[in-house]
Image (cartoon, rainbow, N blue to C red):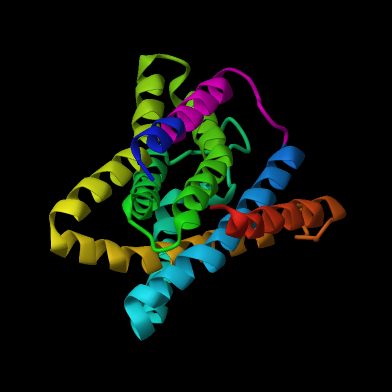
């Protein structure tokens, strides 16, 4: 699968959704929670159905160690992002301090990690396309929250547009670099092979946290949330049928 067109589409989805979110409120809290539950379940499905089988075949028994490292690495990154990647907006009042530099820095690392697996060549042809869909759907609630936070701290000026543009570019750029360098240098290809299970572990952390936190303040598993999760899992399972 050529990586150019999917990366362009991934950038456009992120950037245009962010631009809209800076101007209008795209979704209310309830719809955002359902979008998070759907994206989290789809991301988790792609991780278990595609990434983990691929990485076990590639890395053998070491895959479990790398997945565990990725899980706790994401926990560390969350200290800087304050949970934005799984739905925390931190915009509760005008007096609430928003650590935007810390959040964008942590999210930048997270965005780069998301991009590296997109530039890898997989054994199963469905994995590549499925992963692009999963990352794109995961980025929608993330970019909406990021754009809202940028607007709250910087307004709608050129600086805000520049921050949004940079953030939207990070994942596609990481994919392009991984694809190019991985094809030219054997050592880079080996590093990418290790990065896949690490990112899979991070995805597991993000998805399971979304399941726990999205929804009511009491973390109740509502009927709407169940439907969103089932739809996400069903879509993930359907990717196994793609050729």
Please name the predominant secondary structure of the magenta segment in the image: helix
Extreme residue toward the bottom, this view: 61
164 shown above or below 59? above
x then y, percent, for residue 239: 60, 55
Q: Which residue lies furthest to the top in this view?
A: 157
Residue 228 located within the stretch drawn in magenta? no
Q: Is residue 90 in sight in this rendering? A: no
The front one of 175 and 123 is 123
Q: Can residue 31 be seen in this view?
A: yes
Q: Which residue is situated farthest in the right direction here?
A: 223
Residue extending farthest front: 243
Please indicate whether residue 57 sits to the left or right of residue 205 in the image: left
Looking at the rendering, the stretch of residues picked out in magenta corresponds to 10-28
Above or below for 87 versus 63? above
Q: Where is residue 120 in the image (x, y as percent from the top left)?
A: 33, 55
What residue sits 80% from the left and 53% below the top? Answer: 227
Q: Is residue 27 shown in magenta?
A: yes
Query: Hey, which quadrant is residue 144 in on the image?
Result: top right
Please tell me which residue lies in front, 19 or 100. 19
């Amino acid at each position: 699968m050529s990586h150019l067109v999917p990366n362009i589409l991934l950038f456009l989805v992120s950037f245009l959704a962010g631009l809209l979110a800076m101007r209008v409120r795209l979704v209310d809290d309830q719809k955002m929670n359902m979008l998070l539950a759907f994206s989290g379940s789809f991301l988790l499905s792609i991780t278990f159905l595609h990434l983990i089988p691929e990485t076990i075949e590639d890395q053998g028994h070491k895959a479990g160690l790398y997945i565990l490292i990725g899980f706790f690495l994401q926990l560390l990154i969350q200290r800087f992002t304050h949970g934005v990647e799984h739905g925390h907006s931190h915009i509760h009042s005008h007096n609430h301090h928003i650590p935007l530099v810390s959040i964008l820095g942590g999210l930048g690392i997270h965005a780069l990690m998301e991009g590296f697996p997109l530039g890898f060549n997989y054994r199963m042809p469905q994995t590549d396309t499925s992963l692009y869909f999963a990352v794109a759907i995961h980025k929608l609630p993330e970019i909406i929250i990021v754009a809202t936070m940028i607007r709250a701290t910087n307004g709608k000026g050129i600086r805000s547009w520049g921050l949004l543009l940079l953030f939207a570019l990070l994942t596609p750029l990481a994919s392009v670099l991984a694809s190019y360098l991985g094809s030219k240098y054997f050592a880079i290809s080996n590093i990418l092979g290790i990065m896949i299970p690490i990112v899979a572990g991070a995805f597991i952390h993000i998805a399971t946290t979304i399941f726990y936190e999205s929804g009511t303040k009491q973390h109740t598993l509502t009927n709407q949330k169940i439907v969103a999760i089932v739809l996400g899992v069903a879509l993930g399972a359907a990717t196994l049928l793609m050729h």
